[in-house]
Amino acid sequence: MAKPAPDLMERIVSLCKRRGFVFQSSDIYGGFSSCYDYGPLGVELKRNVKDAWWQSMVTGRDDIVGLDSAIIQHPEVWKSSGHLEGFHDMMVDCKECKGRFREDHLEDRNKCPNCGAEGMFTEARAFNLMFKTFAGPVESTASAVFLRPETAQGIFTNFLNVVNSSRVKPPFGIAQIGKSFRNEITPGNFVFRTREFEQMEMEYFIPPGEDDKWYEYWIQQRFDWYVGLGVRPEKLRKRAHADDELAHYSTGCTDVEYRFPWGFDELEGIAKRGCFDLTQHSKGAGKDLSFFDEATKERYIPHVVEPAAGCDRTAMTFLVDAYEEEVIPNEKTGKEDVRTVLRFHPKIAPITVAVFPLVKKEGMPDKAREIVAALQDVGLRTFYDEKGAIGRRYRRQDEVGTPWCVTVDGDTLADGTVTVRDRDSMTQERIAADEIVGSLKQRVADWKRG
Ligand code: ATP
């Protein structure tokens, strides 16, 4: 039975720190606000998110190729893309408490959400979100460069390189995962909005006129991706942008949103970008970025549909969605216990299987280590633990979302069987130790959210 907690986010943030998912950055210096570091389990979680995305976007299909472009690019890129002129948020200050807010995030544009003062906001001012720095030893206007605020532009500027080197033809995509930087006015909600974050973006280049077809296709694909990795569909929704929300280049955008403890919020945007970006870079760079179709003898500037997701937001979604506090009977005391469990999809869980010798003697650790080696050999993320009561070891794994625990006990040495304990049902099953690899691979493939 799930027990919703009023301070759910606090509990998740505390679990993240306690168990090594996410730490406040520069912790020993008192922390640096809204910057976070991923710990031993968090880095595995995030890697799984990226691997699953890459598999669904690149390696699992034959119409999309990958790219890894530089964070610092030619400053003209940002002029052509419109970021220099237009990538800003409108910001207001409260004259009473000096609080600073993003105007479009204010529920009430009259009353300060911080101090309650009414009619005390300054006029809204445009605030460019790009981080500026200098390339080389001289700090001058000529050496000013920007940290990329999105990965997409590196894809557009490499369009010709990819077309000329990779035998691709529309419809085809270029996908990229990497860090982006935005000097957000109000970062917050843990890793949901930070100034340094990772994006997973794909630009799908299509013949003009096919925009709506591919737009609908990618909205559905991306929605299904989250569901396929175990996110509860009833917590997800698609939200089409109203006309006044659309970016200047876009003729349509739909967000995939998740219902976080503070309400629905964006995980990913799927946008129709038309031929805006390639046209702009053609003009800015003076290069022809059209595509010539050998079959139809037509030349055109491809249109683009872009699914742009945030890796940190996705990792956080998996955490929030998987988190459960379950009331279970304690057989020893006859009372009730609360079990904290992360019901991650096995492809997302930082550890797939934990292996325990029941006790640290009678050859059990050696047998357990043998099983660990066999599991690691086939790429299953494995964790070995020989300390403490077995029940406590199971609970520790529940709390970090390990789907299965394998225990080597006295019977293993006698009849060659081990116990497989299931995180979700907490049931235990004996199977032959030499079938463990096949059995666990099958369990990963068959897993369904209960
Ligand atoms: P928002 O309206 O929340 O500021 P956006 O619409 O500007 O986001 P996009 O430019 O569409 O965001 O970026 C694509 C994705 O990158 C977002 O859906 C989100 O997952 C991620 N993202 C954007 N900004 C941040 C941030 N500051 N921190 C973490 N992830 C972010």
Image: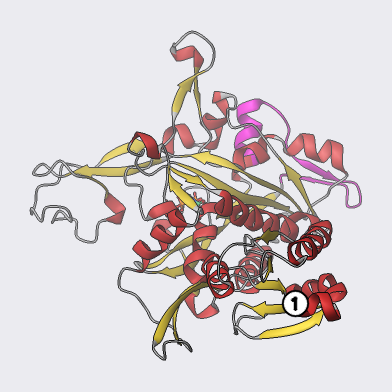
* SS class, disc 1: helix
Residue 44, percent across and down?
A: 62, 53
Q: Residues within 10 Å of mark 1 (few under 14, many from 20)?
A: some
124 left or right, relative to 94: right
Residue 33, percent across and down?
A: 34, 41
Residue 333 occupies quadrant: bottom left
Q: As displayed, is residue 270 above or below residue 5? A: above
- From where the camera sits, is residue 418 visible? no
Closer to us: 12 or 110: 12
Residue furthest to the bottom in view is 334
Q: As displayed, is residue 302 above or below residue 346? A: above
Q: Which residue is mark 1?
A: 410
Residue drawn at 48 percent across, 89 percent down: 331
Residue drawn at 63 percent across, 33 percent down: 281
Kindly tell me whether mark 1's CB lies below 8 Å from ligand 1.
no
Residue 407, percent across and down?
A: 70, 73
Indicate the quadrant containing the N terminus: top left, top right, bottom left or bottom right. Answer: bottom left
Q: Amino acid at mark 1?
A: Gly
Closer to us: 153 or 209: 153
Closer to us: 40 or 320: 40
Residue 323, percent across and down?
A: 48, 71
Colour option used: secondary structure
**The magenta stretch spans residue 284:** yes
- Please report the bounds of the magenta region as a residue range: 278-301
Residue furthest to the top in view is 138
